[in-house]
């Protein structure tokens, strides 16, 4: 109850007033009020009633329901909650608190309530609802654990003092470097600094421990990205030696233990520049006119023995990292590019999932086990696509048959609730030195989807097989699942409201209805100006997939059971799956415990996120490098993000993203509207929102910070209305309520 009551002088009995005072304190959350302020909020002017309010406040404090702060001020005690979690800083200097446990949403922490905590720190906070109950805010009570002891950045001299400007703008502050801690580094060097102390109210103090090179240079920046995310860029010498000592010859004794597929038509389809081939397909027509399809995966666990130094290094890395100009593999090259790579015209050891499919792609039978194969052809996706489109070329009959079966698998998958996101993937044409010459987009065509559908089939059926009962007390034994939770209802509601502004409807009745609506939405927005914004928000609205022993299914794929079996060269969870599957096939009862497996799942999920963040960072670096010589040029773009400090614009022809800062829009003062994901001009009431088409000029390309700054050239953005199919301004609200706020509901990267 934030508005004053109309019946200002009406008498109220104490019981009724008691309830109103409680409601008032709740609405103001953590803000303390005295009896005069409470009375004003309740519209009370009668002196006797004011004294009654003061009495009620004392009673509430005596009962432990309210907290007496100071000078006669009280706040609602039950509004305060303490919990632990991690901080994610935003450019303004404030942060969001991400709780470790529970289903509550993120909590906004103002900059003056951080108490020296920095990005990623594990902290304990107290939180409360803001006035009106629309947002949770809080303040840091305790820093439990610092997220990092090392920071990557560029050195800067400000007269007598040296500072490190962190690459990660979300770190929150520059670091002070004493002169005797420079270790020979100089101005504009990119370095790694170890934090030595955190003085209260001052910059953290650090010392240089590694000089990576001059900021802006290719190798320097790529190594800085790997350092920033704690990812190694070379293998320990002893691990390389261990990998080189692995016998490469496949013995007759080993072949005799395996199902032999060497005489069955087998081939690989991979990116044209791939160096490791970890999956192959075989196809054979059976006497009953069904098809035997083999999904053959490199048998990494034959070479990667559990508990060795090589295995420990692979687990530590947990995943390969794909940067714009290089790959940082999970396994040394002798394994990833040689022994385990399914090269054509060579016998190779595999772990396979073999299916008998009828003409409608129904699984009639399945078999899992170790095999030996001989691939007769290596296709690039482009080569396979040309054959699928022309119907002519090597193995055209086999490719066409596989494509027909894959399409039927896909159709059934979508019928059962799988969601199809087809976001364009940005790629760069690089010269010999790694400099970007141009940008192109990777799109999913039939050849890509063919492989994807059979990999999905193998991953799903392995998980189903491992998820069957048969363990202790009839329960399945612990296993490594790839899980994906259903959308958070509140986030889905907000996304539905946003999509509705463009004329699209989302049915949020149940999970299946949501999936069907999202698929229809993805189809409807194709080639529309708002497509990228809506696709991006849709992806961010649904949960992230992770690894876990607790199977809740994979919502995005519409599978009750799903795992990762098909890429053990580049994902450690697949290695774990191979080992667990082998144990079950051999009826080995010595399974690892659930807690042990869950710990490895959590580690793998964390490493996967770091790798993904590093990959995005390398793309941002290359995008800025690509735009470096285009400062002053004009481009068309689409608003892809809206924050309290500016709007992000994605350029139409390259998908390069930059920021228009609100302070750089000179014609009016703009404010971020939290609930509508838009900015509104205070004087003109002009509105700029997600999906708007705008014209920009490139203002600045900051390579060391991987940031692009744009200038807005037109302030009458065009919007596409889904129903009319033409560009026109959306109607302004009757009264654009302008308000400043920090909250970025969709978690845009800043």
Image: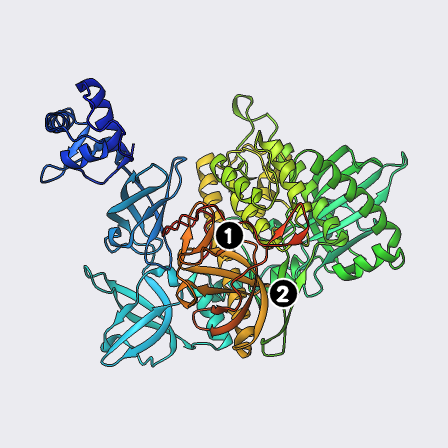
Identify the disc placed on residue 152: none
Q: Position of residue 84 (x, y in %)?
A: 31, 42
| Above or below, comparing residue 271 to residue 129 in the picture | below
Q: Is residue 656 left or right of residue 453?
A: left
Q: Quadrant of residue 38?
A: top left
Closer-to-camera residue (133/15): 15
For numbered disc 2, what is the local secondary structure?
A: strand
Residue shown at the point (56%, 45%) measured from the top left = 501
Please tell me which residue lies in front, 478 or 191: 191
Whether residue 300 sits left or right of residue 618 in the image: it is right
Mark 2 closeness class: few <14, some 14–19, many ≥20 residues within 10 Å: some
Q: Does the CB distance between marks 2 and 1 fall below 8 Å?
A: no
Whole-percent x, y for residue 559 in the image: 63, 35
Q: Residue at x 38, y 79 (%)?
A: 188
| Rendered position, 338 above or below 18 | below
Residue 627 visible in image: yes
The residue lying at 34 percent from left, 81 percent from top is 187
- Above-or-below relation of 213 to 21: below
Q: How is the image coloured?
A: rainbow
Q: Quadrant of the N terminus?
A: top left
Disc assigned to residue 427: 2
Between tags 2 and 1, which lies in front?
Answer: 2
How many other residues sit within 10 Å of disc 1, few (<14), some (14-19) or many (≥20)?
Answer: many
Residue 462 visible in image: no
Residue 268 drawn at (x, y percent): 75, 55
| Residue beneath disc 1 | 608
The mark that comes first in sequence, 2 or 1, is 2
């Amino acid at each position: 109850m934030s508005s004053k009551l109309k019946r200002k002088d009406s008498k109220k009995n104490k019981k009724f007033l008691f309830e109103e005072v409680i409601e008032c304190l709740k609405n103001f959350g953590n803000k303390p009020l005295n009896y005069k302020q409470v009375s004003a909020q309740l519209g009370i002017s009668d002196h006797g009633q004011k004294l009654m309010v003061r009495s009620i406040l004392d009673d509430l404090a005596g009962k432990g329901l309210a907290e007496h702060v100071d000078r006669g001020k009280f706040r609602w005690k039950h509004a305060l909650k303490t919990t632990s979690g991690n901080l994610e800083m935003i450019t303004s200097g404030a942060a969001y608190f991400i709780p470790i446990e529970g289903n509550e949403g993120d909590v906004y922490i103002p900059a003056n309530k951080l108490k020296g905590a920095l990005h990623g720190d594990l902290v304990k906070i107290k939180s409360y609802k803001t006035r009106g109950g629309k947002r949770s805010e809080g303040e840091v009570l305790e820093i439990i654990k610092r997220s990092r002891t090392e920071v990557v950045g560029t050195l800067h001299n400000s007269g007598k003092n040296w500072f490190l400007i962190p690459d990660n703008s979300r770190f929150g502050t520059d670091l002070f470097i004493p002169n005797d801690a420079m270790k020979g580094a100089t101005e504009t060097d990119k370095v790694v600094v170890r934090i030595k102390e955190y003085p209260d109210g001052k910059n953290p103090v650090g010392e240089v421990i590694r000089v990576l090179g001059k900021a802006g240079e290719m190798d320097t920046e790529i190594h800085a990205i790997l350092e920033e995310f704690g990812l190694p860029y070379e293998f320990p010498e002893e691990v390389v030696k261990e990998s080189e000592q692995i016998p490469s010859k496949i013995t007759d004794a080993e072949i005799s233990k395996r199902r032999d597929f060497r005489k069955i038509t087998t081939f690989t389809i991979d990116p044209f520049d791939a160096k490791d081939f970890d999956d192959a397909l075989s196809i054979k027509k059976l006497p009953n006119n069904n098809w035997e399809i083999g999904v053959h995966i490199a048998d990494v666990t034959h070479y990667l023995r559990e508990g060795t130094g090589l295995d420990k290094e692979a687990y530590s890395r947990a995943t390969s990292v794909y940067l714009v100009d290089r790959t940082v593999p999970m396994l040394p090259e002798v394994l990833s590019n040689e022994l385990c790579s399914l090269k054509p015209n060579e016998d190779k050891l595999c772990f396979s999932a073999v299916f008998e499919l009828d003409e409608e792609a129904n699984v009639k039978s399945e078999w899992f086990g170790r095999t030996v194969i001989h691939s007769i052809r290596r296709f690039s996706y482009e080569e396979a696509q040309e054959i699928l489109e022309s119907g002519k070329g090597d193995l055209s009959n086999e490719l066409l048959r596989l494509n027909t079966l894959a399409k039927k698998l896909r159709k059934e998958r979508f019928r059962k609730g799988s969601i199809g996101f087809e976001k364009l993937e940005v790629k760069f044409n690089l010269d010999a030195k790694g400099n970007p010459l141009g940008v192109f987009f990777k799109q999913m065509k039939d050849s890509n989807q063919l492989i994807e559908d059979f990999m999905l089939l193998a991953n799903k059926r392995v998980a189903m097989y491992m998820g069957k009962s048969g363990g202790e007390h009839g329960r399945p034994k612990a296993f490594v699942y790839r899980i994906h939770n259903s959308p958070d209802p509140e986030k889905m509601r907000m996304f539905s409201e946003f999509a509705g502004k463009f004329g699209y409807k989302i049915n949020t009745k149940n999970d299946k209805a949501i999936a069907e609506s999202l698929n229809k939405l993805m189809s409807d927005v194709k080639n529309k100006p708002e497509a990228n914004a809506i696709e991006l928000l849709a992806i961010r609205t649904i949960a992230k997939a992770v690894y876990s022993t607790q199977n809740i299914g994979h919502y995005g794929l519409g599978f009750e059971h799903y795992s990762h079996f098909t890429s053990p060269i580049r994902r450690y969870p697949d290695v774990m799956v191979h080992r667990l599957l082998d144990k079950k096939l051999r009826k080995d009862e010595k399974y690892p415990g659930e807690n042990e497996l869950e710990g490895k799942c959590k580690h793998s999920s964390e490493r996967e996120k770091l790798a993904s963040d590093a990959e995005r960072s390398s793309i941002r670096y290359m995008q800025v490098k690509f735009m470096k010589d285009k400062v002053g040029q004009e481009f068309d773009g689409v608003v892809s993000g809206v924050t309290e400090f500016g709007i992000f614009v994605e350029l139409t022809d390259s998908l390069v993203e930059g920021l228009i800062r609100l302070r750089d829009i000179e014609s009016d003062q703009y404010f971020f509207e939290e609930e509508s994901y838009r900015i509104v001009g205070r004087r003109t009431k002009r509105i700029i929102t997600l999906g708007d088409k705008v014209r920009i000029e490139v203002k600045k390309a900051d390579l060391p910070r991987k940031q692009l700054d744009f200038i807005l050239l037109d302030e009458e953005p065009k919007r596409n209305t889904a129903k009319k199919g033409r560009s026109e301004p959306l109607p302004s609200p009757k009264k654009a309520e302008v308000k400043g706020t920090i909250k970025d509901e969709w978690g845009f990267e800043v």
